Image (spheres, coloured by chain):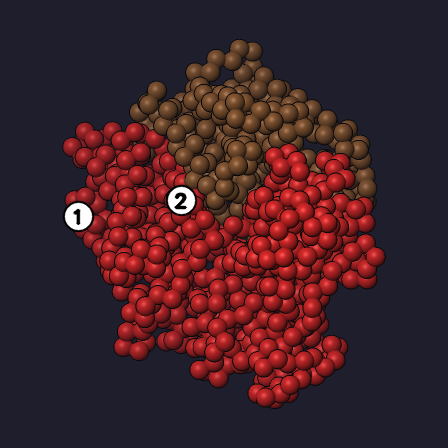
Amino acid sequence: MTKGKQEIILALLIAYEIALFSVTGQNFFSLGNFFECIRLGVEIGLLALALTPVIVTGGIDLSVGSIMGLCAVSFGWLWRDAGVPAGWAVLVTLAISLLGGALNGALIARLNVSPLIVTLGTYSLFRGLAESITRAARNYSGFPGGFLFLGQGYLGGIVPTQTIFLVVAAVGFWLLLHRSVIGRGLYAIGHGLEAARYAAIPVKRRIGLVYLLSGLASGFAAIVYVAHLGQAKSDAGTGYELIAITAVVLGGTSIFGGSGTIGGTLLGLVAIVVLQNGLRLSGWPAELAGILTGILLILTIAIERAGKRTRWALASVLALAVLIGGVGLQARHAGSAETVTIGVMPKAKGDPYFISCRAGAEEAAKQIHVNLIWDGPTGLDAAKQNEVIEGWITRRVDAISVAVENAAGISTVLRKARAQGIKVTTWDADAETNARDYFVNQATPSAIGYTLIDEAARLMHGSGEFAIITGALSAANQNIWISFMRQRVKEKYPGLKLVTVRPSDDDRDKAFQETQTLLKVYPKIKVIVGISAPAVPGAGEAVKQSGRQDVQVIGLSLPNLCKPYVHDGSIEAVVLWNTKDLGYLAVWAPAALVRGGLRPGDTTLSAGRLGVVKLQGDQIVLGAPVIFRKDNIDRFKF
Amino acid sequence: MKFRPDREWPSLLALAVLYIFLALMVPRFFEAENLRDLALSNVSVLLVAMGMTLVIVVAQIDISVGSLFAVVSVACGISAKAGIPILPLAAVAVLAGAALGAANGGLVSYVKAPSIVATLATMVAWREALRWSTGGAWLEGLPSGFQWFGLGQLGGEIAIVGSTLTLFVALWWASRNVAALREVYATGSDSEAARLAGIAVTKVVFWVFVMTGALTGLAALVNAVRFSDVPANSGNNLELKAIAAVVVGGTPITGGRGSLPGTLIGVALLGSIGPALTFLGINPYWEKAIQGAIILVTVLLDAMSARPAKALASR
């Protein structure tokens, strides 16, 4: 590759992105948003910078995200459970990240195993250790202010604190790769291992070093992540390795080794972060970020490989396509110009439960002429929730309505939104009470847990074994429900025995397999309780295929997903509230707040199709959960 | 066909140790019903891993198979809802998979994008495009002829396992006896030498991706027909499962070598661990750590027995 070609393509691309989003994005072109972009890029940036020398040597490190998870929970454990002061806990955490990197390095350099395989193994191993340390459920928060400043504070009132980490890392890795003898050696290794060895480069030590550094950078990324979010959980950094690798490769580093620059990696990082941020501020579908990143990866390679004439053709096709797409989207967007804009966030966009809430949200938005932005993480991801809300604050939406994944983590951002005059409501799950105006409460965790156990006890006539199929092991909601379920069993139904809790990762096929195994391992099980929407039909299908008439499935799911099983008797009952109504209120309440239809001290709220809804203090109560059975399930269409 | 486990022995050993341990501790693991369920839940991984074996033998990688799987699953659901009968629907699945595989192959062979980058791009792009177009909604209310190919549970199960095993044996035989597949080994072993020997290496690589796509499409179909609905987000982490199975099965990531029986052992080993832990009553939060450890141990056994000198920097 001609030196610098990819960098020029990328710089042009970024300039193009900035120009486009300055026109289409609200408040995109501002100093505040510039620094927000940097803040969002720090964790991925640290990983991408460290991965550059790794990939330059022809290696790869898939375990960086998992090291982040392990370090995050280690830090939380040290600080809270072991009582180590935060400063020391940071140091020990960084030492652990070095150990992780050292394990990768030792296996790759000493034992000659391919880096892809080693880090594929440690990818599982480190994440698994993080889960086993915390039993996947523990969630550390309440860190001291001085520590949180690292991830949430501003230097001089405007520059996010964690920028320092990124700048130091960028300079450090630049010096290492481009201004040191060691760096030249890394390129030599990437070009040809044998030649490098004959040139008296200590190949094994150098390769060990790059993995050590990538471990250490992951440790720093974990510290920034925990301070940024205010919580430490075993799922920290999930999927970050792929985004970081994307940034490196987009930046022109050859995956085969031997070439690549720190400057290129930074440009790749900027291209990705600006794309995500700009799409959000323009109100365009977030899925476009993934699609466009994929296209960019291919196109930058194609442009770089192509001849001169083809290159210009490709580049202009790209520019034209983006322009047309942008104008088209903008036109559609402009068509829906309403006076009030409300950002409504589910916990996970991909979850059937929230998909059905969305229908109600859109109904309300249409009815009362509100510009609805429905956006959030695809799967459960507290960090992504914060990121989206930061974007909404920059966009200056009128109100924000969130289904909160992590109360401690999101409340800081929500308070910031309120301080800027944005109305904040929560729905489905609450934030800290001073971080929002109202909470749309569909059912308390205790009501959910109790209802499920009462139903199970009824089916089992008060005694026998049952099992739970949950979502992800680390899902906060599910873990709270499980604790209330255990409590109910202990207090009211001594005859019931919970034999095991198995994860389904919100995947129907996995829930199916777990249930099949459960039925064989615990043949005396009478009831299986699924507490994630896809888990209940999965369990139902497994029971149906086993032909076991003596096992009942109940759970928390959507009537539509379970209807066939409820009718053929493999699912006994599904517990849920009306998700459409919940989505409806999630838009109606903040709109009423903005327009003055809801004021502090009100005891009722007139909510359109739902009639008059009761308020309890600052909670808007939707009503008790509904139990769907054979006789009533067909009346519900969601 | 002779099977000499010279590279497969670490995984074979690990599998033997696991099964002997299980036989002593929880003999119920080997009851026919459990073995049948295990086989059924792993056929789709096996089909994908068969394709992945060829991809890795030809010294490439494909991390987009999970997204391909999801796209084809949804395509199957849409076609079934549109009233397409099951046999043409099988053709739709295989062809759709092959077409998606051809996109990967085209990027790798003709645009000359490194396979890990090309399939990273398609992995992200297809998954997000699918999410955008379906909005995450499941395909419900499929016609009754869809589940189990309309053959009933037992008939469907026999059809799925039977056809997968037939295909496996056929591909295994072909990989040792058919010139076109020997060219895959030649290309992966030394692409330049293969080219000089008159092999059209770009085409070979292209068709390996097409074949992997087709096998992934088939995998999506045989998985989808086991249920009555099609969810919009299936196949998560399938690429990791398939790659891990291939590698644990003794196929070196450097290409040019590797065998399908090894992959079968790898699929059996990794597919048994999860249920085995449940049978042993081990808490599920240990599962990932144990899986990671098993991958590392088998790979280490392999590394210590035979050390390929070039493994260090290439993949």
Q: Is residue A378 visible?
A: no
Residue A71 appears at what percent x and percent y?
A: 34, 52
Q: Is residue B284 left or right of residue A561?
A: left
Chain letter matching colour brown:
B
Q: How many labels were placed on the picture? A: 2
User: Could you tell me which chain the residue with mark 1 belongs to?
Assistant: A
**Which structural element holds mark 1?**
loop
Please report the residue visible at 29 percent of the width from the left and 69 percent of the height from the top.
A146
Please identify the quarter of the rendering in which residue A416 is found.
bottom left
Q: Tell me the colour chain A is drawn in.
A: red
Q: Amino acid at mark 2?
A: Leu
Of B300 and A324, nearer the camera is B300
Going by the picture, which residue comes out furthest to the right? A631
User: Could you tell me which chain the residue with mark 2 belongs to?
Assistant: A
Of A371 and A426, nearer the camera is A426
Q: Is residue A323 above or below residue B199?
A: below
Q: Amino acid at mark 1?
A: Ser
What numbered label is drawn on residue A129?
Answer: 2
Residue B139 appears at what percent x and percent y?
A: 72, 50
Of A370 and A270, nearer the camera is A370
